[in-house]
Amino acid sequence: MSEAPQETFISHLVELRERIVKAVVAVLFVTFALMAWPGMKELYSLVAAPMMHAMPVGASMIVTDVTGSFFIPLKVTLMAGFLISLPVVLYQMWAFVAPGLYKHEQKMALPIIVSSTVLFFCGMAFAFFVVFPSIFKTFASFTPVGVQMATDIDKYWSFALTMFIAFGITFETPVVLAVLTRAGIVTVQQLGEFRGYFIVAAFVIAAVVTPPDVLSQLFLAVPLVLLYEVGILVSRFITPRTRASEDATA
């Protein structure tokens, strides 16, 4: 009898290892495929396109690190490989967790995973297609006369990655509010009353995450506030789960 829990624990560890290995293999497979086509240099050129279009004619990016010309495109390719293989990674996570969930929890978890993934990609797309072209042109317009604008590729990738993560997380706001409402932690009325504080918090977060300019802060704070309103609207159609209803369902 005493060996049964231990055997169950070991079997879970073995399954977890298998799921992690499958997820890692999927990421590496897609990454190597991207290295073959279109190639690391082409992927970095795609990511750097908004910055290159905003720079003056004849300007270019520079490499200040000896290994930067190799490792920065490699990092971009790894990130692209992870994002493309994200459905496989999420499926492995879901396959490992799902057997331990109740049916009502499974029905709730799957839409959350799908919607949060889609919203994160939407946030990255918004940053790349809307935010980057605007703020880079603004930055380039402030270049003093006689100064050559030449951005280091390492610093550019760090900036782009930070913005991708910031906007991706920002677009998760409706999902977070829906989960909190469903769990009974907050109510729609409380979310409405907290609206004023959230607006202030949105601008504070934007000031901390984005570069120190008004345009970048507005690009993050305004969508964050709008998504908060979307989250409140979605929460109106969600019935909070109480402890009694959980026991009844279980």
Image (cartoon, rainbow, N blue to C red):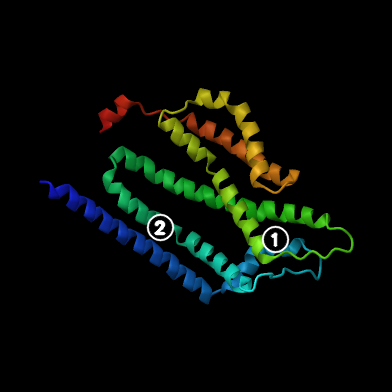
User: In the rendered image of this protein, does residue 49 appear above or below residue 165?
Assistant: below
Image coordinates for residue 6, horizontal then vertical, percent: 19, 50
Secondary structure found at label 2: helix
* Label 2 crowd bin: few (<14), some (14–19), many (20+), radius 10 Å: many
- Pointer 1 with pointer 2, Cβ within 8 A: no
Instruction: Say which quadrant the C terminus sits in.
Output: top left
Image coordinates for residue 99, horizontal then vertical, percent: 27, 47
Secondary structure found at label 1: helix
> For the image shown, how many numbered marks are present on the structure?
2
Residue corresponding to mark 2: 89
What's the CA distance linking mark 1 and mark 2?
29 Å
Question: The residue under label 2 is which amino acid type?
Answer: Val
User: In the rendered image of this protein, does residue 178 appear above or below residue 66?
Assistant: above
Residue corresponding to mark 1: 50
User: In the rendered image of this protein, does residue 140 appear above or below residue 41?
Assistant: above
Name the side, left or right, on which 131 lies relative to 28. right
* Label 1 crowd bin: few (<14), some (14–19), many (20+), radius 10 Å: many
Residue under the point 50% across and 59% down: 83
Question: The residue under label 1 is which amino acid type?
Answer: Pro
Q: For residue 181, what is the image quadrant?
A: top left
Name the side, left or right, on which 151 lies relative to 248. right
Residue under the point 63% across and 61% down: 157
Label of residue 196 in the image: none
